Amino acid sequence: MNASSFNQERIVLIATILIAVSASVFLSGFLNVPNLISIVRSISVLGILALGMAIVIIGRGIDLSMVAIMAMSVAWYLQMINDGYNDYLALMLVITGVIAIGALNGFLVAYADVPPIFVTLATGLFVFGYVRSQLIPSDAVAVPHGHWLELMGQFRLFNIPVDVFIFIALSFAAFIFLRFTKWGRYVYFAGDNPAAARNIGIPVRPMQVLRYVLAALISFIAGLLTAASLLSIQTRVINSNLLYDVILVTVIGGIGLSGGKGGVRNVLIGSALIGILLNVMTIADISLLSQNLIKSTILLAAIILDGVLNPRDEQTAQQGDI
Amino acid sequence: MTFRERLQAWRYNLVPDHIIGEILEKRWTDNAIPFVALIATVAAFGSQIPGFFSLYSLQESTRQLGEFSLVVIGLTVVMLGGGIDLAVGAIFALSAFAAIATFFIFALPVWVAFLAAITTGIIIGAINGYLIGYIRLRAFLTTLVILIIGRAIFEILIVNYGSIAQMSQVSSDIWDYIGDDIILGFSVPVLTTIIVAFITHIALTRSRPGWHVLAVGGSRRSAHNAGINVRRTVFFTYVFSGFTTGLAGFLFATRLSGTGIGTGHGLEILALTAAVVGGNSLGGGRGSVIKGLMGAVIVLVMTNGLIRLGYGTGTNQMVLGVLLAVAVTIDIRWLKNRHKVLNEMYVAPVYLKMDDAPSAEAGSGTAFELNNRLSKARSIGLGEIEGPEDVILDRNDHLYCGTRHGEVVRFFAPDYTESEVFAHVGGFPLGLAFDRDENLISCVGAMGLYSITPDRKVTRLSAETRRSFTSIVDDAVLRDPNDLDIAPDGLIYFTDSTKRYDAHDWTLDSIENRGTGRLLVYDPKDGSTKTLLDGYRYTNGVCMAHDNKSLYFCETWACSIHRYWLEGPKAGKAECVLRNMPGYPDNINRASDGGYWMAWLGMRTPSFDLSLRHPAMRKRMTRRLPQDEWLFPNVNTGGVVKFDDDMNIITTLGDLTGLSHPSVTSMREHKGQLFIGGILNNRIGLYDIENADKNWTAPVAYWGEKS
């Protein structure tokens, strides 16, 4: 086995298998069908968000506004339904808003040259602040009784919740997009070397906008699923560590932060590791606070590993690339 | 003059447009936007919130401001070094907890609590610095993860030990004093901030480590290549940020005597917004402690104000989000387009109506009538030299000239076919003169007045004069020293053509046509440089009159010659002795017959004279047209003119073919021959003067026979 076959993806895969095997040996209640389904279900929203994040990161960006968009778009949508708006009208309005905020992200990154980290940090803050202060009266908004989201949340096929199918379907769609479509290949080119991509005639900047819009739409879908399974949306989720979990899943699966590397497979592996880890920690009765500590330490390890595997060079590092 | 033209003259000559461009060139204009924002914010919230400006209210609210400013100062230093530190939210909380735990749980003295808080900050800062500086991870994500880890540890600690600290009975006068009291009208946090800000400012602007931080932030690669230890510098910026944040955490702990789960929550976003709103650049190198402080006041007044005015949950985040996005975008766009704005604004032409000149056309019959005699001049160093602006000969008949490559080249007598680089100066040597001791003194473009000894030692005599009181851009610097001459007492009189443009931008100066040229004098005895005259349109050639009682200097864009009196009733005064020449005068030098040779670098054209009456048109031209399509003084035809002390024109020489000497910037008479230089030429011309004194040489005329 040579060194190159020992990359991060394989390390993580092996770690996942090791954890899964040892958990099934040592933890009763791990290896049974209901628990496995709950693992997949618990990871599906995270995984969906990670798909969006992956598309942006592969294109050498990052989107810190995803969780804010996820929570606030759905909260606004449900608020409008509760206020008696027409469902389609409300949905159209929200989708328009989501696309607009994604386009704003993309525009500022692509055309104003602002680093994506700051753009999306600011828009995330703004989206939360605006919706919370102007559009909804309380922190949580409930799904109205009999709404299609409620039905969707209760829907089961072979006893498996619908989230899982949507995660699988979106993963497949993202896979097709990244591998087999022209615009999907552009993501890699632009992520690998934006200047070269631009020189060979790829519309780098419109494609950048497209990626942020896609990430925003994916966030909205993840928000709908969250609302469907919990029957309400809690806007305080933006203060939680969900966003960092999304980055954790993406980075730990082996998608380099400098762009151009990785794919849906990496997201799936990252999701599997985090899903199993969270499940194991919960079964082992580790407190939520300690879980946060463990997760963030793993994220730090992943970033250090990423830094060691994809080192930055003093001579070629971009100025202001923070 | 039509009414419209008179209006133009008033508009462009009385309104000081050029000041805008000069102000924009100042670094402190970067502070203007945040400063206005600061005033607006304080005024808006101060007028809305009752009692905002009362002393007690200010003292109390500035306690929080002091702590926050400390955090922002730390973050500012990190940002100046090209990084970012989001971990401050965790460092602040953990340091505060460390102080609380040491003091209330372990009942140790206050100074131990202080040390605990500071140490906590420095340790976490060192971890950040190690990961980012030495392992070179991405600052944003790394500090974000450290933030999450730190917050997780803090929450675990607070859940497990928070209540023990709260039930403690420990108390201390010093602790309460730091937390509650006022010294000289200031609270302790404000005093601490003032001291830390002052020290940091001095360190950044006036010390080696501070310069290293700015260098690394300004250009990491260049700093690395220049031998600065980039990794260590980056490391210490994070340690410093940990230190100031730890200090802030300690002050917070003494103020509230407790910490809660919300301590320091979201502080990183507030601090980041403050640093950026204050005008510190992302990516480093540009910014200051003052900017950070301004941003801190803006952000804190705004967020606290919104809460006190009773706006609901989320309003703060909304405002912060907008503030951050707008500030970052302005920062990026401004940095990118600053020089473009400056280019657009800088050129500020003035109105000038030139009177009609006598014709210089061949066959016109005027005194200035040009002929074709220079086309017969022989060439020296053809194709070997570039840009001999001035030429000069020494006592041994060797010929010297400056070149565009920053050298003084010497051609050997008698046939001037062989040459050598006499000395390397580094800048473009323009005017040349020999002093009594045969040192070659030269006005070096954009550098100053230089002396080259016979054994080729180059020394700088002067690079600046006294700054004038009304100047905005420092006008002490000699931007375009052009020509010089030396009086018998050794004083060196020289011109600095313009204060507004560098030497190579002379076309822009001609288009602007603003009078900023100076006549200066350098005294070799005490090394001082004084400004004698100011406000001429491109002062150029200088020549001592034969009797040494006055000197002539020319004002190129005004096509005039002035006489500056050194002795007699008019001493210290200048008078215009010849105006409205048909050509643009350059260097002036003595002739053997008691007259003076004057070079014309180009001829006036009716089109450019007309454009001088249309400043708006010239401004539009520089903005909208590429440089090679600008209308500026014609330099395709020049010539040489000889005049005498009574301003009679005695001879003119020209090259109407334009092949060998189209533009002439200098000429020297030596033993009956005229040596001709041109700044745009690739040769020195050699012309035999009819009826000239075959023995006359300038060194003898100036300094007498060699003893």
Image (cartoon, rainbow, N blue to C red):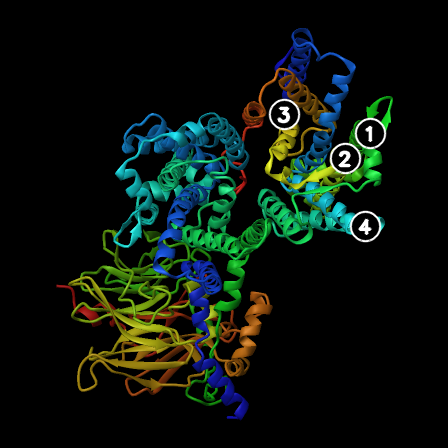
User: Element type at marker 2?
Assistant: helix
The residue identified by callout 2 is A225
Say which label, 2 or 3, has the lower sequence index.
2
Of callouts 3 and 1, the N-terminal one: 1
Q: Say which residue appears at 79% left-offset and 42% top-offset.
A: A144
Percent of width and height locating residue B448:
31, 61
The residue indicated by pointer 3 is A252
- The circle on residue A92 is 4
Considering only vertical position in the picture, is B117 above or below B473? above
Q: Secondary structure at mark 3?
A: helix
Does the CB distance between marks 1 and 2 fall below 8 Å?
A: yes
The chain under label 4 reads A
First of labels 4, 3 by sequence position: 4
Q: Position of residue B200 (x, y in %)?
A: 33, 45
Tell me if residue B661 can be seen. no
At numbered mark 1, what does the secondary structure look like: helix, strand or loop?
Answer: helix
Q: Nearer the viewer, mark 4 or mark 3?
A: 4
Give coordinates of residue B666: x percent, y percent.
37, 70
Residue hosting label 1: A162
Is label 3 on the same chain as label 1? yes
Q: Given the image, on which type of amino acid does mark 2 rest?
A: Leu
| Mark 2–mark 4 distance (CA, rounded to whole Å) | 18 Å
Residue A59 visible here? yes
Instruction: Give how far apart the Cα atoms at labels 2 and 3 are.
Output: 24 Å
Q: Residue at x 42, y 67 (%)?
A: B22
Q: Amino acid at mark 4?
A: Met
